[in-house]
Image: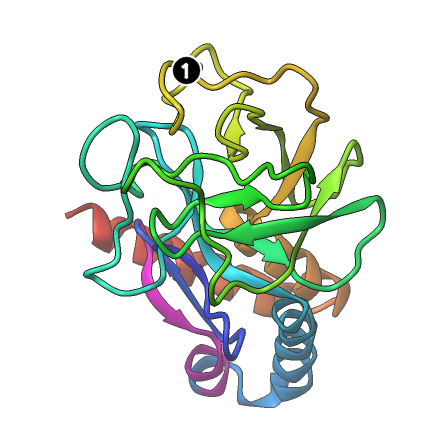
């Protein structure tokens, strides 16, 4: 998957950028800018300590699933086979309290999907792997932003009351539900998920705040060069 390294917050991996290590880049090209580098790394260190990267959108079922579990953990997709990361950015799911956050979201170790486990009344959703309920074994306690805009977030996510899963309802497709048929958004609020396709925009803004146009121009050129190399 693509996104900020969840453990250190120093390496950004994009499908179209490969690996860019900020430390190496700044130390090689701007050895006098260590203050900027450290400030930026601390910024993302604090963000990643409060959330978990490695979540992806599956273009087949439209669900949110954990794609950073390793090459042999691709989950089970209700559309068919394993989930896919094709076309997805990297999503961060918080596990610390956030403004207008809804608690009760859980990872299912069987299908790898994110599902709502706090519905009460014995509501445990449906997992496509074995047709039984979702599992909360080994999961952290996740919190989603509900009906609240966040700057780096993508709105248009919904809860499906049939399977209890989170799915992207901002497009024309209804996806595929673990409980059969298509997902529904009846009774759901509008969830916003932190999305790191905007990471380089954030970096550029941070560097711009340092009032060092040479640094900004140089880094912009470097990322452009990496993009061009990866097109080949």
Residue found farthest to the top: 172
* In the image, residue 24 lies in the stretch drawn in magenta: yes
Where does the image place residue 229, in percent across and percent down from the top left? 22, 55
Going by the image, does 185 lie left or right of 18? Answer: right
Where does the image place residue 73, in percent across and percent down from the top left? 25, 58
Going by the image, does 75 lie left or right of 177? Answer: left
* In the image, residue 47 lies in the stretch drawn in magenta: no
- Residue at the disc numbered 1: 182
Q: Dividing the picture into quarters, in which one does residue 24 lie?
A: bottom left
Which residues are drawn in magenta?
Answer: 16-27
Q: In front here: 40 or 147?
A: 147
Q: Relative to 148, is 68 above or below?
A: below
Q: In front here: 112 or 56?
A: 112
Going by the image, does 123 lie left or right of 146? Answer: left
Where does the image place residue 88, in percent across and percent down from the top left? 39, 40
Say how many tags the image has: 1
């Amino acid at each position: 998957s693509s996104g900020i390294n969840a453990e250190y917050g120093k390496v950004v991996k994009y499908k179209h950028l490969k690996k860019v290590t900020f430390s190496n880049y700044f130390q090689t090209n701007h050895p006098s800018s260590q203050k900027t580098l450290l400030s930026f790394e601390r910024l993302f260190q604090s963000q990643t300590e409060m959330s978990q990267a490695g979540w992806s959108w599956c273009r087949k079922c439209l669900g949110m699933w954990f794609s950073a579990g390793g090459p042999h953990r691709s989950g089970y997709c209700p559309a068919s086979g394993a989930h896919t990361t094709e076309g997805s950015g990297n999503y961060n799911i918080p596990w610390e309290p956030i403004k207008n956050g809804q608690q009760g979201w859980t990872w299912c170790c069987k299908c790898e999907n994110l599902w709502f486990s706090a519905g009460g009344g014995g509501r445990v959703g449906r997992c496509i792997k074995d047709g039984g309920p979702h599992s909360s074994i080994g999961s952290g306690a996740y919190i989603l932003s509900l009906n609240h805009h966040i700057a780096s977030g993508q709105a248009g996510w919904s809860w499906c009351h049939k399977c209890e899963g989170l799915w992207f309802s901002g497009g024309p497709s209804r996806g595929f539900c673990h409980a059969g048929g298509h997902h529904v958004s009846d009774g759901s609020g509008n969830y916003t998920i932190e999305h790191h396709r905007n990471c380089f925009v954030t970096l550029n803004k941070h560097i711009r705040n340092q009032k060092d146009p040479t640094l900004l121009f140089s880094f912009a050129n470097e990322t452009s060069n990496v993009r061009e190399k990866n097109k080949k």
